[in-house]
């Protein structure tokens, strides 16, 4: 529990220093701390005469990832309040040095202000999504048996590596009768960083294409998933049946469907605005305008279904797997 609190604390500190100071800068350049204190009605501390308010504390905690699942909410709240005091001290020093007039800082503040306003409009549009009915929830449950009625828990031993070794070479190496132990050794000999871990993945947390491939694997076989920064070879240790009833899955499905509708509304709004706007690309973009980027509308967070999802470091390579059969 101590490690968990420490990790949450580190994440909190990073968030406060990066985004919290920005928010403080925005409010500091606006109506001032006295105005915020009046709205909050209560202070948790004063720093050189300036209030750190309950309003600020609640705002931070509401937007802190994982706060609701914190093992010690009281300790987290106290830590958040202490970090707000640290932020106020840094803010005072920044204002004393007139950093709010620095051109780079002014640009960053204005960019952040525009981003916050744009996101606020998008959130207001997405909030109009209609919650799904019980019939729609049941239909979704019936149409996704692998996630619910036929749900499984996949115990995987994962070998993650950076892209020091090209993915094509890794794929070619895996086509032979290769043990995971020799794979790790082979990667390390080529200067690649390797991280070995054990993780239990429930069906509903696995993307559909990968989930379908996992269904065909036998213990000891593996699949590879790559990203821009690393590749992960996952060896199947065991697949265990763990079905979820409609009643157990109902809340998760409701949130999933609601998120899909919110996402659709956001995308429709962006598309509509683009169609109605007079957009003229200039300079280097005049001849070949950029195409709309995927992910321009951030996907809402999905509430996870009841699941077992554990991960631990495993530096013992013995028994990692029988080879890379099935590696794609």
Image (cartoon, rainbow, N blue to C red):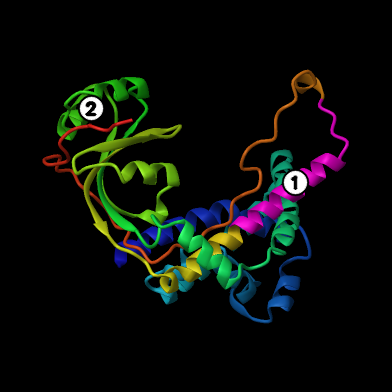
Q: Given contact means CB atoms under 8 Å apart, are the residues at marks 1 and 2 in contact? A: no
- Residue 271 in the magenta stretch? The answer is yes
Of residues 241 and 41, the one drawn nearer to the viewer in this rendering: 241
| Badge number at residue 249 | none
In depth, the one of 43 and 155 nearer the eye is 155
As helix, strand or loop, the secondary structure at mark 2 comes to helix
Dot 2 crowding, Cα within 10 Å, few <14, some 14–19, many 20+? some
Region in magenta: 260-281
Which residue is found at the position 41% from the left and 61% from the top? 8
Q: Name the N-terminal-most of marks 1 and 2.
A: 2
Q: Secondary structure at mark 1?
A: helix
Which residue is rendered at x = 25% and y = 22% of the image?
173
> Which secondary structure type mostly characterizes the magenta part of the structure?
helix
Q: Which residue is identified by label 1?
A: 270
Q: Quadrant of the C terminus?
A: top left
- Rounded to the nearest angstrom, the CA distance separating label 1 from label 2 is 46 Å
Q: Is residue 37 magenta?
A: no
- Please indicate whether residue 233 sits to the left or right of residue 127 in the image: left
Percent of width and height locating residue 123: 70, 59
* Residue drawn at point x = 78 percent, y = 65 percent: 31
Image quadrant of residue 265?
bottom right
């Amino acid at each position: 529990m101590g490690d968990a609190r420490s990790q949450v604390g580190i994440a909190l500190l990073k968030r406060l220093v990066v985004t919290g100071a920005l928010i403080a800068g925005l409010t500091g350049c606006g109506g001032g701390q006295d105005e915020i204190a009046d709205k909050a009605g209560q202070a948790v501390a004063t720093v050189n005469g300036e209030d750190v308010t309950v309003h600020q504390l609640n705002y931070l905690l509401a937007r802190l990832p994982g706060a609701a699942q914190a093992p010690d909410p009281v300790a987290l709240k106290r830590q958040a309040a202490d970090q707000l005091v640290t932020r106020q001290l840094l803010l005072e020093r920044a204002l004393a040095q007139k950093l709010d007039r620095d051109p780079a800082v002014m640009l960053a503040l204005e960019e952040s202000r525009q981003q916050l306003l744009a996101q606020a409009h998008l959130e207001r549009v997405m909030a109009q999504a209609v919650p799904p009915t019980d019939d729609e929830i049941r239909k979704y449950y019936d149409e996704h048996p692998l996630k619910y009625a036929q749900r499984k828990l996949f115990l995987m031993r994962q070998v993650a590596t950076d892209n020091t070794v090209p993915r094509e070479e890794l794929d070619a190496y895996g086509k032979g009768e290769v043990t995971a132990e020799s794979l790790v050794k082979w990667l390390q000999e080529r200067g690649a960083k390797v991280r070995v871990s054990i993780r239990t993945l429930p069906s509903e947390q696995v993307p559909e294409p990968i989930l379908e491939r996992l269904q065909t694997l036998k213990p000891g076989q593996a699949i590879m998933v790559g990203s821009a920064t690393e590749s992960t070879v996952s060896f199947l240790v065991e697949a265990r049946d763990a079905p979820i009833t409609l009643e157990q899955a109902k809340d998760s499905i409701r949130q999933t469907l609601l998120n899909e509708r919110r996402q659709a509304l956001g995308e429709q709004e962006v598309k509509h605005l683009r169609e109605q706007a007079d957009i003229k690309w200039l300079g280097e973009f005049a001849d070949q305008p950029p195409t709309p980027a995927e992910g321009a509308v951030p996907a809402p967070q999905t509430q996870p279904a009841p699941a077992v999802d554990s991960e631990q470091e495993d530096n013992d390579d013995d028994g990692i797997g029988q080879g890379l059969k099935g590696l794609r």
